[in-house]
Image (cartoon, rainbow, N blue to C red):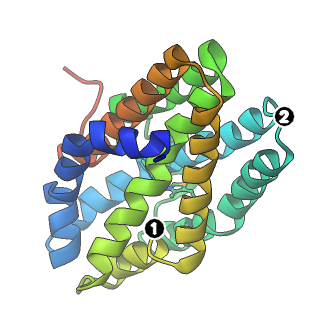
Amino acid sequence: MPGITTEMRKVADNLWTKSFNHPFIKKLADGSLPMDTFRYYLKQDNYYLKNFGELHYKIANQVDDEQTKRFLIDGAQGLNEGENEIRREFFSKLEITANEMKDTPIAPNAYSYVSHMYHELNEGTAARACTALLPCYWLYNEIGKQLIANGSPVDLYQQFIETYDSPEFTDSTNKMIEIVDNFGANADVNEQQEMITAFVRSSYYELNFWEMAYSNESWRA
Ligand SMILES: Cc1ncc(C[n+]2csc(CCO)c2C)c(N)n1
């Protein structure tokens, strides 16, 4: 029997297709994305990644299954050594300083996305919180696999694409899918529905993360 993630992926398919076709992604691939837009994305993603790592530890504290606990802790550590390392390189190349970060508040969509993930953990369950993390892995892996075929003529964008197509990253994505499928198999119908909702909401915020950067979203009216 297919796991709950098959159903989630189906329900969120429109949102995912819109992410694949978002001008941010299309222009990343053809190299025409303004560097300022990518810079904005990186700064907001810095907030996202910091919270994403912390959430891994917090969720790990609430799960009983040892393998899942291990994966989440390793994932947070891998984030510190892997993805964050590449980001430090990007920050340095684009001269994004600590002072500039201090002067850049988290933007509305990034704030809502992070708040959603904390809500799923604090007001929900570890299963729902894990589900809220899944589109992050899975959507980026699908985007990486799609874009790697042609790559990007801009070095920095090419490096970004390669991060999400690596065999290690594909393994982590598959492991995360398996974890959510296991949670789904042990959940009642109501909890399964809550998990699907958490997945759809994260997929919505993923789509709007591109839009946030593309439209330079801010709190100003
Ligand atoms: C908004 C946003 N969503 C997803 C990712 C991708 N991502 C962030 S952490 C992680 C897990 C393993 O490195 C993955 C895949 C991102 N960077 N920003």
Seen at 30% across and 61% down, the residue is: 38
**Horizontal and vertical percent position of residue 206:** 34, 43
Q: Which residue is mark 1?
A: 95
Direction from residue 50 to residue 10 in the image, left or right: left
Which image quadrant for residue 151? Answer: bottom left
Q: Quadrant of the C terminus?
A: top left
Q: Residues within 10 Å of mark 2 (few under 14, many from 20)?
A: few
Seen at 50% across and 24% down, the residue is: 192
Direction from residue 107 to residue 153 in the image, left or right: left
Direction from residue 51 to residue 162 in the image, left or right: left
Q: Residues within 10 Å of mark 1 (few under 14, many from 20)?
A: few
Nearest the viewer among 169 and 104 is 169
**Horizontal and vertical percent position of residue 9:** 35, 45
Seen at 30% across and 25% down, the residue is: 219
**Horizontal and vertical percent position of residue 17:** 19, 51
Residue 6 in view (yes/no): yes
